[in-house]
Amino acid sequence: KTHVDAPRVLIANSNLVPNWATWQHFRELEAKGLMMFGQMTAGSWIYIGTQGIVQGTYE
């Protein structure tokens, strides 16, 4: 259960808003080490548990 004082966390990985969502801008950020293209939930080293690893390996 949670309560009104519980912290809220929002995590977003490699999101670009439409104005900057071009491959050129993506590659510029990637060259600076500011972007990643992993397509996996744990791409940012978030713990996703065994099921996430099994599912990713299966696919």
Image (cartoon, rainbow, N blue to C red):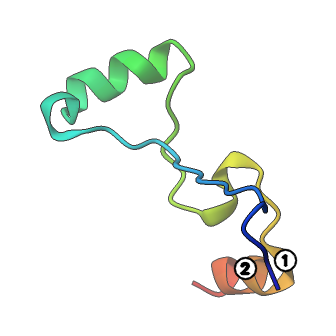
Q: Position of residue 51 (x, y in %)?
A: 78, 87
Say which quarter of the image contains residue 21: top left
Q: Which residue is mark 2?
A: 52
Q: Secondary structure at mark 1?
A: helix
Q: Is residue 17 above or below residue 32?
A: below
Q: Is residue 42 above or below residue 24?
A: below
Q: Residue at x 47, y 15 (%)?
A: 31
Q: Residue at x 59, y 51 (%)?
A: 11
Q: Position of residue 43 (x, y in %)?
A: 65, 52
Q: Is residue 7 above or below residue 32?
A: below
Q: Please say if the residues under marks 1 and 2 sit with CB atoms less than 8 Å apart.
A: yes
Q: Position of residue 10 (x, y in %)?
A: 59, 53
Three-letter residue code for mark 1? Gly
Q: Secondary structure at mark 2?
A: helix
Question: Residue 11 versus residue 31: which sits nearer the camera?
Answer: 11
Q: Residue at x 77, y 71 (%)?
A: 48
Q: Residue furthest front?
A: 4
Q: Residue at x 46, y 24 (%)?
A: 30
Real-space Cα separation, disc 1 to disc 2, in angstroms: 6 Å
User: Would you say 10 lies left or right of 5 here?
Assistant: left
Q: Which residue is mark 1?
A: 49
Three-letter residue code for mark 2? Gly
Q: Residues within 10 Å of mark 1 (few under 14, many from 20)?
A: few
